[in-house]
Structures are given as structure tokens and as C-alpha cells.
Image: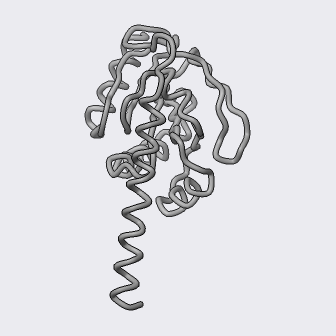
Amino acid sequence: MTMQALHHEWTDGIAIRLVCAVVGCALLSSCVSRQTPGLGDRALAFEIQTLEGDPFAFNPVSGRVQLLYWWADWCPRCEDDFHLIEKLYRQWTTQADAPRFLAIDVGQTEEHVRNFVKRMKISFPIYMDHDGKVARSYGVKGLPTYFLVDRQGVIRHVILGWADEKTLLAEIAKIEKSAL
């Protein structure tokens, strides 16, 4: 491959990511509906699709801690977070009461997300918020965003931006301990 071809491939990739970022921000910032839930509020139930196209109904009251994670592949921080989430998912996948991870892509196509998932070697389930409606209902303003929901469906912690392993595990432990 020539240097010119490499340059075009690189700049085309940058342009695509920039367009995706602008579209994603527009989806998130356009018309925030009703009052959005915050700390101490009951998480909202919603229906979306899995990456495979199957319907999925989120029930906030599941008897488990749930981690709602909004992301997009154009977000560099999200890519870093996926390494952590994959590690935790593999660690906890055999535990019946382990936290449930819901990685919710905002505004991208299935094909685009499938390519990302394959490249990142992700084994946890991915959910699709094609139009950003679910993200807006939660008041998500940027990516990545985490909502930690307790066993009774109450939002106990929100992280806007990157989460390190120590902080994430400490917040999950705090939520689990408060349920005892």
C-alpha cells in the first residue's frame, strides 16, 4: 500500500469518526423528554433490541445490581472501558447474583457495531439504542455514561466519562452492601 493510500485511509477513518461523533451528540442532545431520573430515583424500564435483533425489555427491579453503560465506538474512552467491562464480565459470568452489564450503543448500525465487537473480542451482550431515545430518557448528555442500579431498581451512582476499575468495583460493592 502506498503512503498516499495509507494517508487517504487514515483521513477517511478520522472523517467517519468525526461524523459519527457529531451525529451521536445530536441524538443525545436533541429534545430531552420528560423529567429524567437521577440519583435516588427509580430507573426507567425500556425496550430495545440486542445486537442480534432480538427484543429486550429492561426491568429495573431484577434482584441484581445492574450497570447501564451508554457508549459508541467513536468514543476513545468507551474503547478503554470495554477492556474493563470484558474483564469483569468474564470474572463474574458464572455467578448467579453478579452485576448485570448492559452495554447500550447509541445511534450506530448493527454492522458497524458488529465490526467493533469482533475487533475488540467482546463476549458480553450488546444492546442497540438506534435513535438515542433510551439515552435521552435517562438524560445521557455524553459518552460514556454509566448508571448503577440497585436490586430494587433505584439509581445509586452515575458516572459521566471514563470509569477506572477501583472506582467501579467500590461503587458496586457499596450498592451490594447497602442491600444487606
Query: Is 24 situated above or below 110?
Result: above
Q: Residue at x 65, y 41 (%)?
A: 50
Query: Is 118 situated above or below 132?
Result: below
- Determine the residue located farthest toward the right in the rendered image: 54
Q: Is residue 167 left or right of residue 101?
A: left
Q: Nearer the viewer, residue 168 or 33?
A: 33
Q: Nearer the viewer, residue 173 or 107?
A: 107
Q: Nearer the viewer, residue 29 or 95?
A: 29
Residue 32 in percent (x, y) is at 46, 20
Residue 36 in percent (x, y) is at 45, 14
Q: Is residue 74 left or right of residue 47?
A: left
Q: How is the image coloured?
A: one colour
Q: Residue at x 36, y 34 (%)?
A: 142
Q: Is residue 156 left or right of residue 47?
A: left
Residue 172 in percent (x, y) is at 37, 25
Can you tell which quarter of the image residue 41 is in?
Answer: top left
Q: Residue at x 55, y 61 (%)?
A: 115
Q: Quadrant of the N terminus?
A: bottom left
Q: Residue at x 39, y 8 (%)?
A: 40
Query: Is 111 situated above or below 69?
Result: below
Q: How many marks?
A: 0
Q: Is residue 122 left or right of residue 21?
A: right
Q: Quadrant of the C terminus?
A: top left
Residue 161 in percent (x, y) is at 30, 36
Query: Is 174 situated above or below 82?
Result: above
